[in-house]
Image: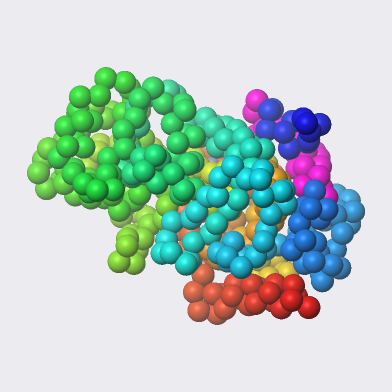
Amino acid sequence: MRQPESIIDKFLDIEDPWSLSETERKDLLTGSIIEAAEHHYKNNTVWRKLCDVKNFKPSDINSYDDLNRIPVISTRAFKGGFDLLSVPKEDIVKVHMSSGTSGNRSRVPRDRITLERARKSILKSNAKFRKGDAGYLGMMSPSPEEISDLTIANYAKISLEDYKSYDFFLKLDGGFDPEKVVEKLNSVTDRPVNLGGAPMLILALADYVMKTGNKILTMDENSAVTSGGGFKSAKGDVVDRETFNQIVMKAFNVKEENVRDTYSMSELNGVFNECEHHMKHIPPFFYISIRNPSNLDEEVPLGEEGLPVFIDPLAHSYPGFIIADDIVSIKTGPFEECACGIVGPTFAPKVRRAEGAEEKGCGRHVDELSEQLSN
Ligand SMILES: [Zn+2]
């Protein structure tokens, strides 16, 4: 049976949702989130119980200003132990996993509706923040076929729909061979030639190019290098973003404005792409609020660091009302204009994992959730 089209689906079909007026945007986002809240309240026992504890009902949302009252679930609750389904089990097409060590991975169940919405939102955000043609993409990561359970691979696969051609250069059995990568990139005929993937592998390629002088001759001023997945190696070393930009610019001869990073999480049905000023833009379909790590119900003033709450009305098979354990700060408010000219919330390149006291805040949230649900 085909469901009547919901507000979020109409929202996703708007050609350029970034160009909507503040009122239009508020109305569409609030309407989408009310519909999502009603759906999850009706169909998700875990979230409804949380709402009851917090004395909240979807009918309490009367305007955009009420959205920060929605009870949120920690990303840690997706790591197991909670049944977060809002649809029958048989509707689930794919369970997406976050990367990381086993036992510490989020498992996010997606039905057909959620997958199609994620696809639309990712393609829309990529098109908005890409300059010109997509051309060719050389990915420094395993192919989505090899790691089909990982969210990041599935999102990469969606992004490929726009490109004329592409390759994946990390083989799960044969490792990573920079010499072969350069050889292949130098034989590509589609333009521009772009690179993407994990920051550490992009750096490994840059290191090879600098040490050997074996250059990628097909990259030009239209080429972009787009990283994703975080600036941390398997050993835990953090790469400073400015250093990363400088190395990448020098090794691949790309402009700094074309060195872009992308933020996403397994629980989010979209990607937050950077503009040429390295601000991560949150697409208009998501609501963001930054919380005080020691009191998660309290919003911090604009510009201050805290834990991000994302209200994602695209999620149909699970409640997309999430608090993440990254520390971010908002640079431009929900209806402010970024230096790039695009209106909407952005956060800065500096995104770090919560630690110490902040980290305790995240853990406490899940403990509270367990306690409330067992009562
Ligand atoms: Zn911008």
Nearest the eye: 236 or 240: 236
Image quadrant assignment for residue 305: bottom right
- Predominant secondary structure, magenta span: helix
As drawn, 136 above or below 333: above
- Magenta segment: does it hold 215? no
Let me know if residue 179 appears in the view. yes
Q: Position of residue 335 (x, y in %)?
A: 69, 44
Quadrant of the rendering where the N terminus is positioned: top right
Q: Residue furthest top?
A: 189
- Magenta segment: does it hold 21? yes
**Is 327 displayed left or right of 24 in the figure?**
left
Q: Residue furthest left?
A: 212
> Residue sitting at 11 percent across and 40 percent down?
213
Q: Which residues are magenta?
A: 15-38
> Residue sitting at 35 percent across and 49 percent down?
198
As drawn, 29 above or below 158: below
Q: Position of residue 256 (x, y in %)?
A: 35, 41
> Residue sitting at 9 percent across and 44 percent down?
212
Let me know if residue 278 appears in the view. no
**Is 152 displayed left or right of 319 in the figure?**
left
**Is 363 displayed left or right of 203 in the figure?**
right
Quadrant of the rendering where the C terminus is positioned: bottom right
Q: Position of residue 272 (x, y in %)?
A: 54, 45
Image quadrant assignment for residue 306: bottom right
Q: Residue furthest front?
A: 90
As drawn, 370 above or below 67: below
Report ligand 1 position as a quadrant: top right
> Residue sitting at 66 percent across and 45 percent down?
90
Q: Position of residue 140 (x, y in %)?
A: 31, 43
